[in-house]
Amino acid sequence: MTRAGSEPGKNGKGAASAVQSVDRAVSVLEILARRGEAGVTEVAGELGVHKSTAFRLLGVLENRGLVAQAKEHGAYRLGAGVLRLAGAAALRLDISQEGVPVCRELADELGETVNMAVMDEDAAVNIMQARGTAAVTAQNWLGRRTPLHATSSGKVFLAHMPPALREDRLTRPLPRFTERTVTHPPALRDELDGVLEQGYAVTREELELGLAAVAAPVRSHDGSVIAAISVSGPVYRLTAGRLPRLGGRTAAAAAELSRRMGYGF
């Protein structure tokens, strides 16, 4: 019969062991970062553990691509996975920093609200906002998760997805937010093809009544779309006749930010 309280103790011991393993794994990465390369014996010596423990840690990290083993002499070094993680964090930071002057200049020129969004799973998330002189009553969109099919930034991300992934998204339910929300997959598919042709996306009262927006893609050095710059405002200012000019100017600003991120070099 199990005594009361014995299981929590067991769980606590397991949790402590897991934390210790994580701490040791991080220490392995720090050792390799400092030394450049190290063998199992050297890693074990610095950690103060048996060689078999060091070997298991290195094996787990190697499976995740965080360390790599040199074939010629068996020593370990940091793997490409570390660069991938560091690059993702740096990219989010860099695009925020580089995007500030581009978005502010666009907001000052057009007088409207300018947002920059990144894709987060099934939503577009605004990470920066600049307000123009005419946008005194504009909403604060910072940090808001907005649906892909009902926003200009979201349509940019959908349009530039690989075809199979885009089709998968279009087979999912498309919630209706207003009477103008595009929820019919064939109609949305045609619109997304148009986004690719004209270089920007447009929405008019599809997420909120009275709100219109245009957005254009920001590309990384490898050409992949990593963000979208959008211009939004009330429909009485962002008229159908004005949207093409706004779309062209937004696309130019997005191209400038893409250049700053290394695209085209």
Image (spheres, rainbow, N blue to C red):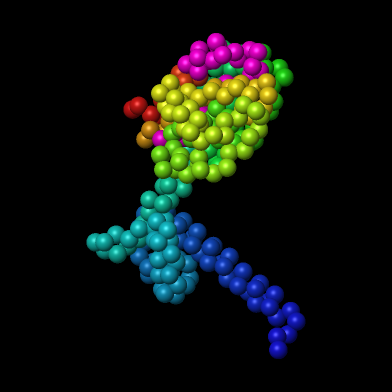
Instruction: Confirm whether residue 194 shows in the render.
Output: yes
Say whether residue 225 is magenta: yes
**Image point (70%, 75%), residue name:** 8
Quadrant of the image containing the C terminus: top left
The image quadrant of residue 123 is top right
Q: Position of residue 43 (x, y in %)?
A: 41, 65
Classify residue 53 as left or right of residue 71.
right
Q: 123 or 18: nearer the eye?
A: 123
**Image point (68%, 24%), residue name:** 209
Residue at the outermost bottom position: 1
Q: Position of residue 218 (x, y in %)?
A: 46, 29
Quadrant of the image containing the N terminus: bottom right
Say whether residue 96 is magenta: no
What range is drawn magenta here? Answer: 224-248
Q: Is residue 185 above or below residue 20?
A: above
The image quadrant of residue 161 is top left
Instruction: Confirm whether residue 128 shows in the render.
Output: no
Q: Is residue 58 above or below residue 8?
A: above
**Image point (59%, 17%), residue name:** 107
Q: Position of residue 76 (x, y in %)?
A: 35, 60
